[in-house]
Amino acid sequence: MLNPKARPCKPSPQTRVNFSSDELYDRLVRPDHPLRRLSEHLDLVFVRKTIEASGLYSRHSGRYAMEPELFIRVSMLQTLYGVSDAGAVDEACTNLAWKWFLGLEVEQTAGFDDTTLGKTRLRYAAKGLLALVRAQLAEAQADGFIGQEGDTHFIDSAVSIADAAVLKAVELVRRICGNLREALRPVLARETADRLAQTDETLRQDTSWLLSSALKEACLQKWSAHCAELIALAGELLANPGAPGELGDWARHEKRISRQLEIARRFLADQEPKAANAKKDNLASPTDPEARHSSRKSDGSKLGYRMHLEVDEQSELIVGLLGTPANCEDGTALQTLITQAEEQGLKPKAVAADSAYADGSNRAFLEEHGIEQYIPQPRPKPSKKGLKVATDFDYNPVAHTVKCAACVICANAHEQASKGGWNFYFELAVCAQCAQREQCVGETPTRGRTVYISPHRRLTDEARQRQRTDEHKDALRRRMKVEHKLQRLLNVMGLRHCRYRGLARFEIQLALGALLVNTEQLGKLKRKREVEERKREGQSQAA
């Protein structure tokens, strides 16, 4: 029978062994550990130099709260393993592999806490982290891994899902009104706060909006009126706080009210009628007001942000990155990405992207910068009436004329100031006698055909011709390299979902992911170079 009284175990002097931290790490962190492979060619000397030059810290206010290189190492581990700030502190205290990667002694504590990590991250922000990515690319250029003439850059994007619920319209306004009312409650008179609470409760008990679209619209109008009342109260209180302004914690209340007031005003602005062709940019979540629904049908109802990447073909390094709300069209990011690469001396010879970037202004930008483009032109939208569209007419940019399918040439062009192109007007007498009039102007035309030619028509015509070539098809096949980087960021670096809220914080997450992905790729390039050098040495000795 076991003795219920446990006896203390005394350490035996014969079995006590003293190991240094290096010896313990050699024994307990296996040689093929992923962090050993990551750290094999990891050189972060540029981190401190970049942070010192960025002006993020004063040169006369003592040492850093957290050493820049240590912060980047911890951030890399967080990105790689999906660990929170508090979890990172625990891992740095207990995980030997983490301790080895961070350069800590075995018995040493983390030396930082979760608050320090969060504040340092916000201090660096996306601007500071992008500076680190650029400094890393500059070192890669100096080492000869990137920047060769004739490089092709690949561009693509993907959506990261926001850390916020997708709400229906009534649920959204409920949440907005509730948040603003709670922000006002501590500084309002009791009678006013009780009246607002009663109005809110009455509106919440009305569930008729679930029955029909008409009742839903009526319910939305009631909630919008309540929201407008709360906005008026909040605006008046902020303009003239009176007694609440004398409270010791008024600054905290003022900040909270201002934030919720901005969200409520944005919601009411979204309810106002807009032009039929206006782009939808409605508030989608009060939790993350900057997040938007994706504009792509293939993304479904994803709410979040979109990351845009530019990848160099030869080195497979990320040379440009940009974060935007998810409703941002891909084409709007191309010029920004190319400009980022040019500022680093990494101007590409050619750019390959999918048809989402086939914007006329993008094609003009690339032509102006002398960059060859491998961007397929999407098929034109068919006419709702089944008639011929503008691309069915041949445009001669030299003569500035348009020719129809019946070989009739029209030179009657009128400039369109609003669109920037030209309208070509065919004569009614010619169109009425044409055998193809039913496919062009209808069975009984009342006027001649009008054809709009965009200012970028020459470029789009050339793109359609170019995309039939084998060179163009081969470039699009090689574009899979940027897809690999996107999948690495999404599935391994945790960018499938946003870790933080707000566009600025999403860009922080994106920059950290890109920094780690480039670090991994530079390790592969350095190992490949070492293998080639050893092979050359062996060949020279054999000779």
Image (cartoon, rainbow, N blue to C red):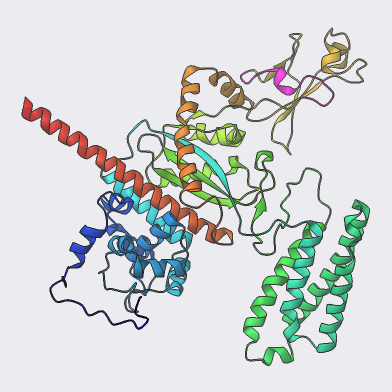
Q: Is the magenta stretch mostly helix, strand or loop?
A: loop
> In the picture, residue 456 is in which quadrant?
top right
Query: Where is residue 443 shown, x and y percent of the image?
Result: 91, 15
**Image height check: is 505 above or below 274?**
below
For residue 458, which quarter of the picture?
A: top right
The image position of residue 299, as x and y in percent, is: 65, 42
Q: Quadrant where the C terminus lies?
A: top left
Query: Can I make out residue 440 in this image?
Result: yes
Residue 284 horizontal side relative to residue 60, left or right: right
Q: Is residue 387 magenta?
A: yes
Q: Residue at x 58, y 36 (%)?
A: 357
Relative height, residue 107 to residue 373 (above, below): below
**Front residue of 149 and 282:** 282
Numbered-mark total: 0
Residue 15, position as x, y percentages in the image: 16, 71
Residue under the point 51% across and 49% down? 322
Side (left or right) of 493 relative to 501: left
Say which quadrant the N terminus sits in: bottom left
Q: How far across and down, in percent of the image, does residue 102 sit? A: 30, 63
Q: Is residue 527 left or right of residue 448?
A: left
| Residue at x-position 74% and y-position 14% | 404
As for residue 246 lying within the magenta part, the answer is: no
In this orientation, which residue lies closer to the viewer: 388 or 381? 381
Q: Which residue lies furthest to the front in this view?
A: 1
Asked if one can make out residue 52 in the rendered structure from this viewpoint, the answer is no
Task: Find the magenta span and give its range.
Answer: 383-398
